[in-house]
C-alpha cells in the first residue's frame, strides 16, 4: 500500500452504474490504477472518492480506468460554479434517462401484450396462436433494441468478473428467442413450442424494475441539490473605506466582513459584528422561531436575514461552511450504510455460470449416452429455457410495484426499495419535533395582562401593530385576534428586539426584554408569568402601551392532532419512540411530556443529529428517523430507515427512504409495516422462482422436459410470483 502520509483524495462523478455489482466493478478498476490506496463508490449519488499516493494516478488516468471498465467518469472540480454545472449536467442526464425509460416501457408493453394474450386460449386448449414469424417480429425490438442495455451490461460484467442480473437476462432471453427463431425457420422438432413471449416479458419486467431503482437513485442526488441550493452564489464584501463590492461566494475569505441585507441568505458562516436582526434558521437548525441576532452572535450559512441590516465577519467558508458540511454528512451517511446487494445480484453471480455448465453437461451427456444430436440440443435448450430468469426477473419488481401501489393509496411514497430489507431490523423510531410531531408554526397560547389592562385589549392592539408582518409570531398574534386587527398608523421594526408602532393614536411596543429596557419600561412585575411561560416551553413577547407595560404574549408550537396516537402506535408495535430536536430544551420537554415520550433530546445541532442516530443504533439496534427539514437530512441518511414528511423540505424528502405524503406521523409505523411486507413478498417470490429451477433444471437435464414444457413451467413460475405479489394490494394502513 502507498505511504499513507502522502495520500490525496480525488473525486469523480461516475455514470452508467445500475446495481451494486456495477459499483463493485468501478471500485476494482480504480483500485487497480497506479498508486491507489483505496476507492469508495457511492451508487446513490454516483460518486467515487479515490485515495491516491503522491505521484500516483492523475484524475485523467482514473477517468480512463473507469471508462475502460465500461462506465462514464468526470473529475470533480471545486467551487460553487463547478458544482452548479455538475448539478445541471446530472439533471439533464437524469431527465433524458427517465424519458428513455418511459418510452422503452410503453413500447415493450405494447409489443409484449399480444404475445402474452395468446397464452390464454392456449392454456384453455385452443390451438389458436399468432403465427411464429409475426411473434418473432413483435419480440425482436424488445429483444435487440430495448434489451440492448442488458447485452452491454452483461459484456461489462464479464470483463470485470462481476456477473449480475444483466447476464441472466441476456442469457435467458437469448436462449428463448434464439431457439424459437430456429423453430420458425424449420430447425428443431416439428412440434416444438415458441418462447418469444417469455423473452419479451423478461425484458419488460426487468426494465420496469431498473426504472424504479434509477428513480430512487436520482432522488438522493436531488436531496444534495436541495441542500446546496441554500448557498448564495454572491456576497457583498465591505471594503476599508466602507463601500461594498459584490464578489463570488467562493471568493470570500475567513475574516472578510460582509453586508447582509434584509431578506438575503448568509453566504458563509460568520459572526455578527454590527447591527441587529432576526434570522430564520428553521431549514438549517430546526428552530421553529426566527432568532434574534446581535453583535457577537453566530449566523449559519443559508439562513435568511429578517428586517435588519447587519455586518458579518466570515468565520467558516467554502467546504468548511454549515451547508457544505451537512452535504458531506449526507453523502458519507448514505455511503456508510453499505446496504447489502440485492439478493438477485448476489445469487446471479454464481447462477449464470452454473446454468451454462449444466446446459453444457446436459448436451455432452446425451451425446455420450445415445449419440442423438437433436436430443442433446433439446435437453440443453430446455435447461437454458427453464433457467431463463422470467420469475427471477419479476420477483422483486412485482412485489415492489404492488407494495408501492398499496402504500401510495395510504399516503406513503417508498423511494428506496432497500428499505423493505431493512424494515425488519427497526427497534426504535426517532422523530424530529418541529414540523413532524408539531404543526411547525407557533400559536399564541396565553395573554397575561398587567394591572390596569385587559387581555382582549392587549391582543387587539398587538395584532393591529403587527398587521401585515410576515414574522411567525406576528402571524400567530393576528390569527389569535380573529379579525380584530386594524392597520397601524406607523410601524418601525427594531431588528433583533421587536417593533414599535402607533395604533389608534396609542404608542405600541412589542418584543423582548431588551426592547422594553431600551424604551425605559420595567418588566419585573410579570416575572411570575415569564417563569410560567418558560416552564411551558413558550416563547414570549412583552407588550407596552404608551410607555407602560401592558402584558405578555406566550407562543408555543402545538403537537399535531395525530402525534399522540402515532407515539402510541409505535409502542404498540413493540418499538421505542424517541424525539430529537434542535429546539430549546424547555419546548422539547413540554412536547415530550404531552406525547408521553421518555427519551427526548434537545438542542441537537444538524451535524450532531447523525451522531445521535448512531448512539441510538448502538443502544437499540435498527433505528428509523422521521423528519421534515434540511437539518434532518444527515439523520435521515444515517438512519437504517429514513422517513420524511411530505410537507417538509425537498432535501429531507429526497434523502429519505420513505416519504409520508400526508403530514400524519401515524404513517411512520404504518410505513414499517408495509416495508416489512414488501420484504417478505420479495423473499417469498425469490424462493418460489428458484424452487422452480431447483425442480425443473434436473428434469430438463435428464430429458424429462421438452422446451415446450420448460417454457410452460417458466410461465407458471411468473404467474405464481406475480399472483403472490398482488396480494400486497389488499394492504391498508391501520390509522
Image (cartoon, helix red, strand yellow):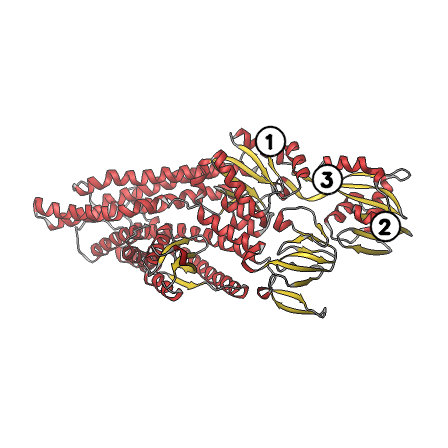
Crowding around mark 3 (Cα neighbors within 10 Å: few <14, some 14 to 19, many 20+) is many
Crowding around mark 2 (Cα neighbors within 10 Å: few <14, some 14 to 19, many 20+) is some
Considering the numbered disc 2 on the image, is that residue within a helix, a strand or a loop?
loop
Q: Position of residue 664 (x, y in %)?
A: 60, 40
Considering the numbered disc 1 on the image, is that residue within a helix, a strand or a loop?
loop
* Contact check, label 2 and label 3, Cβ < 8 Å: no
Rendered view: 267 above or below 168 = below
Q: Which numbered mark, 2 or 3, is in the foreground of this view?
A: 2
Q: CA distance from mark 2 to mark 3?
A: 24 Å
Q: Nearer the viewer, residue 225 or 292?
A: 292
Q: CA distance from mark 2 to mark 1?
A: 43 Å
Crowding around mark 1 (Cα neighbors within 10 Å: few <14, some 14 to 19, many 20+) is few
Q: Split into 4 quadrants, where in the image is the C terminus? A: top right
Q: Which numbered mark, 2 or 1, is in the foreground of this view?
A: 2
Q: Split into 4 quadrants, where in the image is the N terminus? A: bottom left
- Count how many numbered circles sit on residues in the image: 3
170 on left or right of 547: left
- Residue at the (47%, 35%) spot, across then down: 621
Mark 2 vs 1, N-terminal side: 2
Q: Position of residue 64 (x, y in %)?
A: 35, 65
Residue 598 circle label: 1
Mark 2 vs 3, N-terminal side: 2
**Residue position marked by numbered label 2 in the rendering:** 519
Q: Nearer the viewer, residue 722 or 304?
A: 304
Mark 3 vs 1, N-terminal side: 3
Rendered view: 200 above or below 701 = below
Considering the numbered disc 3 on the image, is that residue within a helix, a strand or a loop?
loop
**Residue position marked by numbered label 3 in the rendering:** 538
Quadrant assignment, res 494: bottom right
Amino acid at each position: 500500500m502507498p505511504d499513507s502520509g502522502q495520500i490525496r483524495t480525488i473525486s469523480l462523478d461516475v455514470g452508467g452504474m445500475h446495481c451494486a455489482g456495477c459499483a463493485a466493478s468501478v471500485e476494482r478498476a480504480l483500485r487497480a490504477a497506479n498508486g491507489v490506496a483505496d476507492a469508495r463508490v457511492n451508487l446513490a449519488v454516483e460518486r467515487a472518492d479515490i485515495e491516491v499516493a503522491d505521484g500516483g494516478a492523475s484524475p485523467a488516468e482514473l477517468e480512463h480506468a473507469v471508462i475502460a471498465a465500461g462506465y462514464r467518469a468526470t473529475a470533480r472540480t471545486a467551487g460553487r460554479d463547478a458544482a452548479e454545472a455538475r448539478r445541471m449536467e446530472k439533471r439533464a442526464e437524469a431527465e433524458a434517462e427517465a424519458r428513455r425509460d418511459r418510452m422503452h416501457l410503453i413500447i415493450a408493453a405494447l409489443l409484449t401484450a399480444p404475445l402474452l394474450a395468446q397464452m390464454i386460449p392456449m392454456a384453455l386448449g385452443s390451438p389458436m396462436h399468432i403465427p411464429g414469424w409475426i411473434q418473432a417480429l413483435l419480440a425482436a425490438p424488445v429483444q435487440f433494441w430495448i434489451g440492448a442495455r442488458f447485452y452491454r451490461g452483461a459484456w461489462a460484467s464479464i470483463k470485470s468478473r462481476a456477473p449480475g442480473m444483466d447476464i441472466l437476462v441476456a442469457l435467458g432471453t437469448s436462449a428463448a428467442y434464439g431457439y424459437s427463431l430456429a423453430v420458425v425457420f424449420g430447425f428443431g422438432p416439428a412440434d416444438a413450442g415458441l418462447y418469444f413471449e417469455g423473452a419479451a416479458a423478461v425484458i419488460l419486467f426487468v426494465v420496469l424494475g431498473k426504472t424504479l431503482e434509477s428513480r430512487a437513485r436520482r432522488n438522493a442526488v436531488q436531496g444534495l441539490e436541495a441542500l446546496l441550493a441554500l448557498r448564495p452564489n454572491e456576497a457583498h464584501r465591505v471594503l476599508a473605506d466602507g463601500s461594498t463590492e459584490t464578489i463570488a461566494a467562493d471568493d470570500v475569505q475567513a475574516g472578510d466582513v460582509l453586508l447582509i441585507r434584509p431578506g438575503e441568505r448568509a453566504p458563509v458562516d460568520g459572526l455578527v459584528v454590527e447591527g441587529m436582526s432576526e434570522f430564520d434558521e428553521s431549514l438549517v437548525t430546526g428552530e421553529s422561531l426566527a432568532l434574534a441576532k446581535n453583535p457577537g452572535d453566530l449566523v449559519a450559512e443559508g439562513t435568511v436575514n429578517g428586517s435588519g441590516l447587519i455586518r458579518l465577519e466570515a468565520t467558516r467558508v467554502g467546504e468548511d461552511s454549515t451547508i457544505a458540511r451537512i452535504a458531506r454528512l449526507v453523502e458519507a451517511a448514505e455511503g456508510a450504510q453499505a446496504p447489502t446487494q440485492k439478493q438477485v445480484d448476489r445469487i446471479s453471480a454464481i447462477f449464470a455460470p452454473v446454468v451454462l455448465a449444466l446446459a453444457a453437461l446436459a448436451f455432452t451427456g446425451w451425446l455420450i449416452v445415445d449419440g442423438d444430436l437433436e436430443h442433446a440440443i433439446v435437453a440443453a435448450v430446455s435447461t437454458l429455457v427453464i433457467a431463463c430468469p422470467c420469475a427471477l426477473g419479476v420477483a422483486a419488481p412485482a412485489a415492489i410495484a404492488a407494495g408501492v401501489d398499496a402504500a401510495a393509496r395510504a399516503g406513503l411514497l417508498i423511494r428506496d426499495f432497500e428499505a423493505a430489507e431493512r424494515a425488519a431490523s427497526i427497534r426504535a423510531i426517532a422523530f424530529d419535533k418541529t414540523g413532524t410531531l408539531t404543526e411547525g408554526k407557533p400559536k399564541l397560547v396565553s395573554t397575561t395582562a398587567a394591572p390596569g389592562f385587559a387581555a382582549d385589549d392587549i391582543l387587539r392592539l398587538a395584532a393591529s401593530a403587527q398587521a401585515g408582518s410576515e414574522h411567525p409570531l406576528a402571524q400567530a398574534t393576528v390569527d389569535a385576534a380573529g379579525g380584530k386587527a386594524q392597520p397601524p398608523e406607523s410601524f418601525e421594526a427594531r431588528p433583533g428586539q421587536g417593533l414599535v408602532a402607533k395604533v389608534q393614536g396609542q404608542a405600541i411596543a412589542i418584543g423582548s426584554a431588551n426592547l422594553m429596557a431600551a424604551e425605559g419600561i420595567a418588566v419585573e412585575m410579570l416575572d411570575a408569568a415569564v417563569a410560567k411561560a418558560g416552564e411551558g416551553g413558550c416563547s414570549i413577547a412583552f407588550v407596552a402601551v404608551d410607555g407602560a407595560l401592558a402584558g405578555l404574549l406566550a407562543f408555543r408550537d402545538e403537537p399535531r392532532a395525530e402525534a399522540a396516537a402515532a407515539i402510541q402506535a409505535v409502542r404498540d408495535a413493540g418499538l421505542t419512540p424517541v424525539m430529537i430536536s434542535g429546539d430549546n430544551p424547555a419546548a422539547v420537554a413540554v412536547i415530550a411530556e404531552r406525547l408521553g415520550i421518555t427519551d427526548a433530546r434537545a438542542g441537537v445541532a444538524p451535524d450532531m443529529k447523525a451522531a445521535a442516530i448512531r448512539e441510538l443504533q448502538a443502544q437499540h439496534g435498527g433505528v428509523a428517523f422521521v423528519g421534515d427539514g434540511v437539518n434532518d437530512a444527515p439523520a435521515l441518511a444515517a438512519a437504517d430507515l429514513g422517513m420524511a414528511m411530505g410537507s417538509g423540505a425537498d432535501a429531507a424528502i429526497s434523502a429519505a427512504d420513505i416519504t409520508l405524503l400526508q403530514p400524519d406521523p401515524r404513517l411512520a409505523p404504518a410505513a414499517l409495516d408495509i416495508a416489512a411486507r414488501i420484504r417478505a413478498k420479495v423473499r417469498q417470490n425469490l424462493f418460489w422462482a428458484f424452487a422452480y429451477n431447483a425442480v425443473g433444471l434436473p428434469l430438463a437435464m435428464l430429458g424429462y422436459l421438452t422446451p415446450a414444457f420448460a417454457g410452460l413451467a417458466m410461465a407458471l413460475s411468473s404467474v405464481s410470483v406475480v399472483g403472490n405479489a398482488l396480494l400486497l394490494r389488499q394492504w391498508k394502513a391501520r390509522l
